[in-house]
Amino acid sequence: MNAYVIEQTTSALSKSSMGQEVTLLLIGGAIAIISSIATLIVTNIMDKHGKLRIYKKIVYSKAQTGGTWGFHQATEDMSFQIPLWIEIQNTTNTTQVVRNLNAWLYRSGNEICSMTQVNRVDDTIIANNGAYSFVIAPRSIQKYDCHFTLKKQDAPGDGIFDEVKIAYFDTRDKRKIFSLLRIDYSCCWKEKQHEKDKDWTLLSK
């Protein structure tokens, strides 16, 4: 009788011990999973730490000797030209995308039309091998030669505008817009000598 009781007690203790071991294993597994998820979240946050910045410098045009941005009278029609260098700085640990970078004309805060992205000037291919979408590696800086143009006849309405903005779509396909130039109404579509930028400036809203 005593042996039977001892056996039953031992069996109960053995089952209790096994139950505790299983519980501890489950708790340990849950902690490991939570720890892994937390590590991935922290790593992801750290990878995204930093910013994508675009600097611009308006330069002399490759198409016009000595000329820079502004309104230029051609044989058939007047055109608006912006020769531009951009420098894209990616200080994050992840690859960033700048898609369909273009210049847009605005009037009183309203977007009226886009300019044309020039992919070749004479025999020189510009931008990203002619494209205006860029893939920027982590912790890197890349510079591109860009050029935007618009004929007066292609501008909607009377074509008058007072600001030029740069817009593109980022890695999440979200549109980013930055101010580039302010235009005096009285000078719009009138040929005039303008000055190029003396230094690089950060594109800002």
Image (tube, rainbow, N blue to C red):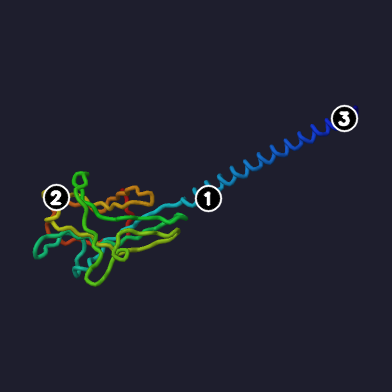
Seen as rendered, the residue at the extreme right is 2
Q: Which residue is mark 1?
A: 43
Q: Which disc is residue 4 wearing? A: 3
Q: Which residue occupies the foreground of this view, 94 or 31?
A: 31
Q: Amino acid at mark 2?
A: Pro
Eye-nearest disc, 3 or 1: 3
Q: Secondary structure at mark 2?
A: loop
User: Going 87% across and 31% down the picture, which residue do you hit?
Assistant: 6
First in sequence: mark 3 or mark 2? 3
Tell me whether circle 3 and circle 2 mark residues in contact (CB < 8 Å).
no
Specify the quadrant of the image occupied by residue 63.
bottom left
Q: Residues within 10 Å of mark 2 (few under 14, many from 20)?
A: few
Tell me whether circle 3 and circle 1 mark residues in contact (CB < 8 Å).
no
Q: Amino acid at mark 1?
A: Thr
First in sequence: mark 2 or mark 1? 1
Residues under labels 2 and 1: Cα distance? 49 Å
Residues under labels 3 and 1: Cα distance? 58 Å
Count of residue discs: 3
- 23 left or right, relative to 203: right
Q: Amino acid at mark 3?
A: Tyr
Residues under labels 3 and 2: Cα distance? 100 Å
Q: Which residue is mark 2?
A: 156
Q: Position of residue 48 (x, y in %)?
A: 46, 50
Q: Secondary structure at mark 1?
A: helix
Q: Position of residue 81 (x, y in %)?
A: 19, 60
User: Going 29% across and 56% down the picture, which residue do you hit?
Assistant: 101
Seen as rendered, the residue at the extreme top is 1
Q: Position of residue 182 (x, y in %)?
A: 22, 51
User: Going 23% across and 68% down the picture, which residue do you hit?
Assistant: 121
